[in-house]
Image (cartoon, rainbow, N blue to C red):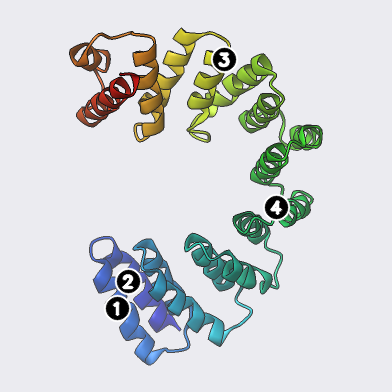
Amino acid sequence: MENFNNLIYQARYVLKSNWLQAVNILENALKDHPEAEEIHMELAEIYSSKGAYEKTLQCYQKVLNLNPNHSYARFKTGNIYLELQEPKLALYHYDKITEDYPEALYNKAIAYRNMQKYDDAVKTLKVLINHPTKMIGAYKYLVELLVMFGKTKEALRYIDEAEQVFGSICTTHYMKGLVYSREKNIIRAYNEYLYASKDDSEYPHIHRLLAKLALVLGQTPNALKHLKDAIFFHKGDTEALQDLVELIVKQKIVKDVDELREYFQGYNEEIRELAVMFYEKAIKEIL
């Protein structure tokens, strides 16, 4: 055992500079240790990190052939199928897990939602929130589903429960924002999202939600600020950039492309060029 463990450590070290060499080390190790589950798992992790899902699944299947009750291999196999938009196969493997595995319950809910089995997703999440390992993400996902179907009173009850467990945190404010937004209570929704935006790394789209509500409230300067924040903190948020440019055009904040470039001074070249593209598109739609 020590021999193949050393080879695993060697592969991990080599992986930093040459992943193919790391794979080669592990595959050679399997020639002498074909039943070493650890080597198959290590190979699976490397292939998964490179997006080679077919090879990843082959590795996990070899582990499951050796040990059908390998919970982590089951869980990871289910996750790969979930990534591949194969929720039925994902559920098959999650259901095969014999150990107590709260993360698998969460992913089962995602699989059910992807299959449009919303009642099953909700039931699974309700089981999960009663698990000793409390997960705020489970409450958030449950509230999102309940709000989607207009069950705002039930959603508020679960938010209250979440606050009893986790306290008043950004996530509970975000959930309240969802509920109040659905109920058209715009001012309360806006204020709750403001609290949630203090941790916008958790909710990168929060600034866009704030911008939409600010516009409903007739607060155009605030809407502009929220969209600028979305672009500044999350430079890949092209939806926020498009929303901002469309708002600039509607409000006639700039007169031409030169002024638009000045408006986006301080942003990188890619952002400025995208802004120009969205600007030209918006102008054509108006004309």
- Mark 3 — residue? 216
**Sequence-wise, which precedes: disc 3 or disc 4?**
4
Estimate the spatial distance between the alpha carbons at disc 1 and disc 3, rounded to whole Å.
Answer: 60 Å
- Position of the C terminus by quadrant: top left
Neighbor class of circle 1 (other Cα within 10 Å; few <14, some 14-19, many 20+) is some
- Mark 2 — residue? 11
Question: Judging from the image, what secondary structure is the residue with disc 2 in?
Answer: helix
Q: Are marks 2 and 1 in contact (CB under 8 Å)?
A: yes
Does any portion of residue 42 appear in the rendered image? no
Residue found 25% across the figure and 28% down from its top: 277
Q: Residue furthest front?
A: 287
In the image, which is nearer the foreground, mark 2 or mark 3? 3
In the image, which is nearer the foreground, mark 4 or mark 1? 4
Q: Are marks 4 and 1 in contact (CB under 8 Å)?
A: no
In the image, which is nearer the foreground, mark 1 or mark 3? 3
Residue situated in front as seen by the camera: 148 or 81? 148
- Mark 4 — residue? 118
Estimate the spatial distance between the alpha carbons at disc 2 and disc 1, rounded to whole Å.
Answer: 6 Å
Report the amino acid beneath label 2.
Ala
**Sequence-wise, which precedes: disc 2 or disc 1?**
2
